[in-house]
Image: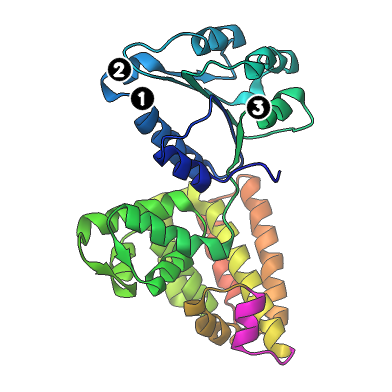
Amino acid sequence: MASDLNPEQVLNRLKKGETSPVYLFYGEEVFRLEKLLDSFRETCLDEAARDFNLRIFDGDIASPADILDDARSFPFMSSSRLIIVRRVEKFSASDLESFLPYLENPVDTTCLIFVSLKTDFKKKFYKKCREMGVAVHFQSLYDSQVPPWIKKAAGDLGLKMTDEACEYLHGIIGNRLREIHTELEKLHLRHQGQSIGVEEIKESARYSRVYTIFELMDHISSKDRERAVSVLNRFLEEEGKEAAFGIIGMLNRQIRLLLDTGTILEGGGGQADVAKKVKVPPFLVKKIVQQSKKWTLDELERGLHLLHRADGHLKTGSQAHLILEMLVISLLAQPWEAAS
């Protein structure tokens, strides 16, 4: 995979007017993939003739013959055509092989982009795409890569964000780039031309779904049962039962974070060790250390067991609101309550 490019490398080439006749876009980071496709639409096609020279196919229903006919057609009132083929993984093996002759001799005035969520580079088609075209890997960002990505995305919108603000927004939302970008767009509308710090992030996020989740995790981690139940009920009233599995996932992540932190502290480590080993954003290290001291390791292990049981009940169709409320109450039960 050494020859594969990342989205930023391709975007930089695109800004210089450098394109390839064939691309293979693959990987799990859909938001960055869609953003790069938007850039290709805006850059490769003249606006006046865009509708005539843009074709989008779906591998679930499209015929390779139709795609190839379009790929070999000349652009209309433009210097290039753009063809996007989504869900390439849905094509049969024989359908994929029908593209091989074109990959050997693509049309220079056509930019053909294959989009595949699942790839098998043992197959001739994927190997040939990599060999004759440009393979672009849309890999999920690591935690350490997200704050720099936020700063750049903010800059693209005309926002100046402090490093602390980027870290804080990452701490609230995690690695969900689409939700992060939505928050950045809100900040752009409210604070054009202003410097964005942590307080502006707090003010903007306070009324959003992601802040409510962050608030819930915070109250549970601090063992504030009354506030945790109140926030949970408010969240479920707004979002409905569909949000239940998201809450389970976030709780699982939070309890494991507390457990890892508690284990480090019990072994004689300090805040620096937590920051290094648990990969907590700098602004959260002190808080997570303080919160972990409110829990015993046995309580956290028991919490993971309770989460597993709640997840099982949800999957059987049990009432989500009741299951989650009982889960939070059980997680934050006093020792004598848990034993009874």
Q: Is mark 2 on a helix, strand or loop?
A: helix
Q: Mark 2 points at which residue?
A: 49
Q: How far across and down, in percent of the image, does residue 133 sit?
A: 61, 29
Q: Is residue 229 something one can see in this rendering?
A: no
Which residue is located at x 55 percent, y 80 percent?
Answer: 288
- Between residue 307 and residue 285, name the one nearer to us: 285
Residue type pointed to by label 1: Leu
Magenta region includes residue 205 = no
Q: In this view, does 262 lie to the left or right of 225?
A: right
State yes or no: discs 1 and 2 in contact (Cβ < 8 Å). yes
Q: Is residue 288 left or right of residue 210?
A: right
**Mark nearer the N terminus (2 vs 3):** 2
Identify the colour scheme used. rainbow
Q: Name the residue under label 1.
A: 45
State yes or no: discs 3 and 1 in contact (Cβ < 8 Å). no
Label 2 – label 3 distance at C-alpha:
28 Å
Q: Report the magenta residues as a range.
A: 267-278
Q: Name the residue under label 3.
A: 132
Q: How far across and down, in percent of the image, does residue 140 sit?
A: 58, 51
Q: Is residue 262 something one can see in this rendering?
A: yes
Q: How far across and down, in percent of the image, does residue 214 sit?
A: 45, 67
Which residue is located at x 27 percent, y 56 percent?
Answer: 158
Answer with the quarter of the image where residue 41 lies: top left
